[in-house]
Image (cartoon, helix red, strand yellow):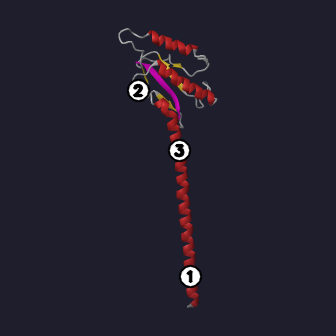
Amino acid sequence: MEDSARFLYLAGGILVGILILTLAVYLFANFSGGATNVENQIAADQIEQFNSPYVSYREKEGITIYDIVNLARKARDYNERNGVSYTTDSGHISVIRYDAKRQFELKNGKDLTNTTLYRKDDSLINDFLIADRNEITTTDNRLPQYICPGDGIEYYEWGKIKKISFYKK
């Protein structure tokens, strides 16, 4: 009888030990997965915050060449600060301006962040500004308007903006 009581205590102790180990493994698995989810959410929030100045132009009314040039300068500064060049596909941001309306086959888009075309002194970008100012009509006295359509923004596979395109209305 005494031996059976000891055996029951021993078996109970082993079962309690297994229960505690199982609980510890379960809690570790849940908490470690939670940290990964938090890290993923932080990364997603950072990408969304980075993209927000560019995405805000999607389907926006009243975009002028000045808005496009300011956005291109922001993208160009980012590209230069991070050492990404126009010729590589390693995180470069492009801001494209098209002269024509969207329904035409467009091969004349100009990437305003291409530093091989547009020097730091912005002389060629200033040509775009002057050309659009010359298009002001006397009837409405407004600069030509542009639009970034819903599909006018492309992203890298990791979610960061790759290219934003503007078309003359």
Which quadrant would residue 111 be assigned to in this image?
A: top right
* Figure quadrant of the C terminus: top left
Label 1 or label 2, whichever comes before in sequence order: 1
Q: How many marks?
A: 3
Q: Residue at x 58, y 88 (%)?
A: 3
Q: Which residue is mark 1?
A: 9
C-alpha span from label 2 to label 3: 28 Å
Q: Is residue 168 magenta?
A: yes
Q: Residue at x 53, y 36 (%)?
A: 157
Tell me the amino acid under the disc marked 1.
Tyr
Confirm whether residue 84 shows in the render.
no
* Figure quadrant of the N terminus: bottom right
Q: Secondary structure at mark 1?
A: helix
Which quadrant would residue 122 be assigned to in this image?
A: top right
**Magenta range:** 159-169
Tell me the amino acid under the disc marked 3.
Ile
Q: Which residue is mark 3?
A: 42
Label 3 or label 1, whichever comes before in sequence order: 1
Report the front residue among 5 and 55.
55
Q: Which residue is mark 2?
A: 60
Residue 34: x and y in percent read 52, 53
Q: Residue at x 49, y 29 (%)?
A: 54
Q: Is residue 71 magenta?
A: no
Q: Secondary structure at mark 3?
A: helix
Q: Secondary structure at mark 2?
A: loop
